[in-house]
Amino acid sequence: MKKNMHKEKKKHKKNSKKRKQVGILFVLIGVLLILVFGFGEYQSYKSAIEIRKLQQLKEASSDNGNGIDTSKILPEYRNLYKTNSDLVGWLVVNGTQINYPVVQSTVYQEFYLDHNFDGENDESGAVFADARNDVFKPDDNVILYGHNMKNGSIFGTLQYYLDKSYYEKHKTMSFDTLYKRYDYQIVAVGLSKITDESADTFKYYDFLNAASEKEFDNFKEKIKSLEVYDTGVKMKYGDKLITLSTCNSVEKNGRLFVIAKRN
């Protein structure tokens, strides 16, 4: 009898110890999840604050004069340029949260994938122009990249354009260079389909300039095959285009692009 009671007590202590260990494990997991979620929220909040700061600096449109000649730059971009000389313009897409400076690193193409406008490490990155592009000339097709962020920042709201009814209400955007203001009309919304880990059916992001009308028409036909709907707006040889490019959640490892032509 006593032997059985001793065994029961020993078993109870063992089970109690296991329950405590499991309880501690759940608490630790809970704390870890809170920390991870909290860090993500903090990063989103920090990114939002940084972007608002840049927007306010643009709106101030003053010249603080630190020895850099910015006389040819549009007034609202002078201070921003002094903050970061990688600045090449400003993008606004009507009906979305996209209202950002555009930077370009010709030294390291992917620098702004994980660095913000101030050059700080930031998983949100920044909106940046393809290093191969001449934004000011400009090339026939200037390509702008940005992350498809879940919180809607950077190019996170670009996916709205997968819905044609949304496009019908938001057909325009603006892209100012440092020196001139330009308005654009959206001509195509598409998804690139990846056939394997390294190849697209068509690398729209490799089209920068058309050597001939035939080459441009070939680009136009390829884009047509990737469109999610027909906007009814046509591209023609000689048009100056911008292409906004981001990842998409529709195709595995796929890309979403929105092309617009200058008015």
Image: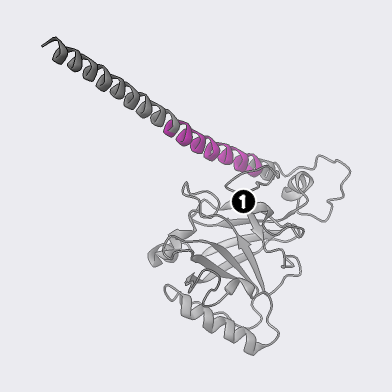
Look at the picture and state if 216 lies above or below 154: below
Magenta region includes residue 165: no
Look at the picture and state if 57 lies above or below 143: above
Look at the picture and state if 185 lies above or below 33: below
Region rendered in magenta: 33-55
15 sits left or right of 228 in the view: left
Q: Nearer the viewer, residue 24 or 70?
A: 24
**Quarter of the figure with the C terminus:** bottom right
74 sits left or right of 222 in the view: right
Magenta region includes residue 36: yes
Look at the picture and state if 1 lies above or below 240: above
Q: Nearer the viewer, residue 159 or 66?
A: 159
Q: Which residue is mark 1?
A: 100
Residue 133 is situated, as x and y percent measured from the top left of the image, at 71, 67
The local crowd at label 1, few if under 14, some if 14 to 19, many if 20 or more residues have their Cα within 10 Å, is many
Instruction: Identify which residue is drawn at 66% across, 52% down.
Output: 112
Instruction: Identify which residue is drawn at 53% across, 84% down.
Output: 221
